[in-house]
Amino acid sequence: MLRLVNKFSIQPLSMPEAQAPTPRDAQRHVPVMLPEVLRALQPETGGIFVDGTFGAGGYTRGILQSANAQVIAIDRDPSAIAAGQALVKEFAPRLRLVHGAFSSLKELLAELGVAKVQGVVLDIGVSSMQLDEAGRGFSFMKDGPLDMRMAQAGKSARDYVNALSAEDLANIVFIFGEEPRSRAIARAIVKARSEAPLMTTLDLVRAVERATGPQRATDRTHPATRTFQALRIFVNAELDELAAALLAAEEVLEEGGRLVIVTFHSLEDRIVKRFFTARAGREPQGSRHQLVAAAPPPATFTQTEKGAVAASEAEARANARARSAKLRFGIRTAAPPTPLAPEAFGLPRLEKH
Ligand SMILES: C[S@@+](CC[C@H](N)C(=O)[O-])C[C@H]1O[C@@H](n2cnc3c(N)ncnc32)[C@H](O)[C@@H]1O
């Protein structure tokens, strides 16, 4: 059984080929569940808060406006960092904006001389700017290069789609897209690329449609939706990033500090739920997930809300993206973190099927 990990290397801090940000960027991403995020995070004057997914800065702005606190914001996308410089100036000297992956948040904070913080928030997934920009290659609705790299560096979707075996492609589409027609889609991709390499998003859409047929009036979503989701998650190693970030946040949060995570699909939410379940001491005693089976380690988080918080009806009506949002949060105890086996997260594995 193979572990499905495409090693995500931490990107250099330069911004070589960043796509030029536009002034419209800041307006284009509507922050999801901002009031709920601020209620869970409880920014306080004098505190340092990490926004690990800066995007268009919606959460960062909310934190900076709600308390005289500092924010260290991180994004792996150089375009987000470039567009965020106006916000850095607006809130100087309270906002520091750092290019990097949130899985490395402990190291990124250490480079700034910061060891402990009072809060960490993550808003998982792509931003509207990334989705809307055809040149980024995230959307099956816009023709553009088959790219999908949030960090604008490393291997792109085009590299993988044209090189991986049919079996690997099927597994990626099945596991990260939860696509029941994964095998047929993978075969169709391999057939299409034997005629000509798949270079654009529409090339991939057409290849998928060879297996599924075009969208029918009765289809709620386009047949390529799940394939695009799967490749995006794979290209950006999104689930591994999330699991690593939860552990890093646990290390940098001081006692009483808050970890707030907003996710948009079940694969992500399951990782967050399992992390909090294990770390809030609700793991059944003797679970195989705990390294010390007999005596569960002391809880590193408490949770006042055990379930996920959803967006308000009004927000869900106004913003389609909010409909699938789930917020979970925990409050850091004083207990030191203990090792957590990767299985505890339920990270998907690449299995033959
Ligand atoms: C949903 S958007 C965040 C939107 C933001 N909360 C706002 O209100 O504008 C997610 C952002 O996180 C970034 N991102 C995703 N995965 C990341 C990772 N592993 N490390 C750092 N940034 C990441 C993306 O590039 C994107 O800009």
Image (tube, rainbow, N blue to C red):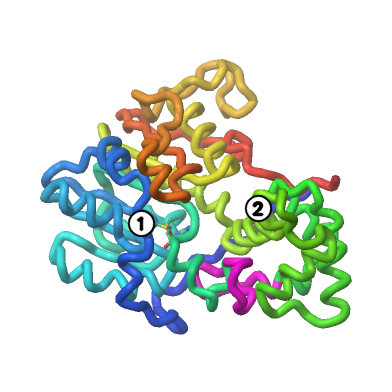
Q: Is residue 34 covered in magenta?
A: no
Q: Which region of the structure is painted magenta?
A: 139-159
Instruction: Between residue 268 and residue 101, name the one nearer to us.
Output: 268
- Which residue lies at the image location 31% right of the left edge and 57% below the top edge? 109
**Majority secondary structure of magenta residues:** loop
User: Which is in the foreground here, disc 1 or disc 2?
Assistant: 2
Amino acid on which disc 2 is placed: Thr
Q: Which residue is mark 2?
A: 221
- Which residue lies at the image location 30% right of the left edge and 29% below the top edge? 334
**In the rendering, at what x and y percent does residue 187 appear?**
87, 63
Q: CA distance from mark 1 to mark 2?
A: 22 Å
Quadrant of ligand 1 in image = bottom left
234 versus 318 height, above or below: below
Amino acid on which disc 1 is placed: Val
Residue 78, located in which quarter of the rendered image? bottom left
Q: Secondary structure at mark 1?
A: loop
* Rendered image: mark on residue 30: 1
**In the rendering, at what x and y percent does residue 3 appear?**
71, 49
62 horizontally vs 140: left or right: left
37 horizontally vs 268: left or right: left
Instruction: Between residue 288 and residue 320, name the one nearer to us.
Output: 320
In the image, the residue with mark 1 has its CB under 8 Å from the nearest atom of ligand 1: yes
- Which residue lies at the image location 87% right of the left edge and 77% below the top edge? 194
| Name of the residue lying farthest toward the front | 217
Q: Secondary structure at mark 2?
A: loop
Can residue 128 be seen in the rendering of this structure? yes
**In the rendering, at what x and y percent does residue 129 appear?**
43, 67
89 versus 330 height, above or below: below
Q: Is residue 151 covered in magenta?
A: yes
N-terminal-most mark, 1 or 2: 1
